[in-house]
Image (cartoon, rainbow, N blue to C red):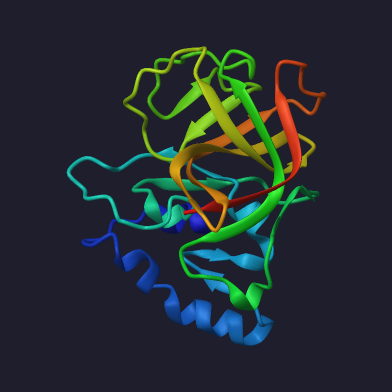
Amino acid sequence: MLSHYSKAEFTFLSDRLIAISSLVNKIAGLTGGHYDSGCWLETIDRCLAWWVESDASSGRVRLSLSSWSWASSTGQITYVSRGEWTRAVTLREDIRQHESGRLRLRGSMWRASLSDLGLRPSGDAKHMGDRHNPLLWWGQPDPKPRDELEVLDCLDLGSNRFGLYLSALQRMSRENGGVQEFKRLGCLMVSLREPGNTINKRAGCFLDLI
């Protein structure tokens, strides 16, 4: 449903969230769910596993929304497919204490170069890879030339029968209460096989996603 909705043309991109606010309120009233910036916090692991399938950014102003929200993009959004899913990240606070626009998370972090992740430049600003494992979709078309030795921080979101899904992150220069802040760059899918020794993987990490 969101895939079709996100490709609709709006005069003002800010209307995309406003237009569904009544529906969100009804769902929250029925389920008791907690919502922020287009995402349900109870399923934040799946809500972070999105990417831009096609972009419509020409002549359009990007919104100043949290990088982890699909509504911060200007194109058609695709989520990880429905079905069996093993979650790997959770909120690290009482959901009732959630601060709007900021996700306080606990999960496993990967740190590795693009080469170690098996990624190669594709000549396509929307993704890196060749439409097979591994594949990295940028949250927005990425105009920056990427060196294969560039190091990425990644947050393990979960897995299904197709592979592991991670959020590719940009480390920010500041911390909040001793916790490192990150912005989301995109969604990475890799093989289910155990990562190589060149990938630094740390469990039980705390981070803020803004």
The relative height of residue 206 versus residue 160 in the rendered view (above or below) is below
Q: Is residue 155 left or right of residue 75?
A: right
The quadrant where residue 199 appears = top right
Q: Position of residue 52 (x, y in %)?
A: 45, 41
What residue appears at the point 67 percent right and 67 percent down from the top-left corner? 93
Q: Position of residue 23 (x, y in %)?
A: 50, 78
Q: Residue furthest bottom?
A: 29
What residue appears at the point 38 percent right and 53 percent down from the top-left corner? 72
Decide which of 77, 168 is in the foreground and name it.
168
The quadrant where residue 42 appears = bottom right
The relative height of residue 149 versus residue 94 in the rendered view (above or below) is above
The relative height of residue 45 versus residue 54 in the rendered view (above or below) is below
Q: Residue furthest left?
A: 59
Decide which of 120, 180 is in the foreground and name it.
180
Decide which of 150, 64 is in the foreground and name it.
150
Q: Tag count in the figure?
A: 0
Q: Is residue 59 left or right of residue 73?
A: left
Q: Position of residue 125 (x, y in %)?
A: 38, 25
Q: Position of residue 106 (x, y in %)?
A: 70, 53
What residue appears at the point 64 percent right and 19 percent down from the top-left corner? 117
Q: Is residue 75 left or right of residue 178?
A: left
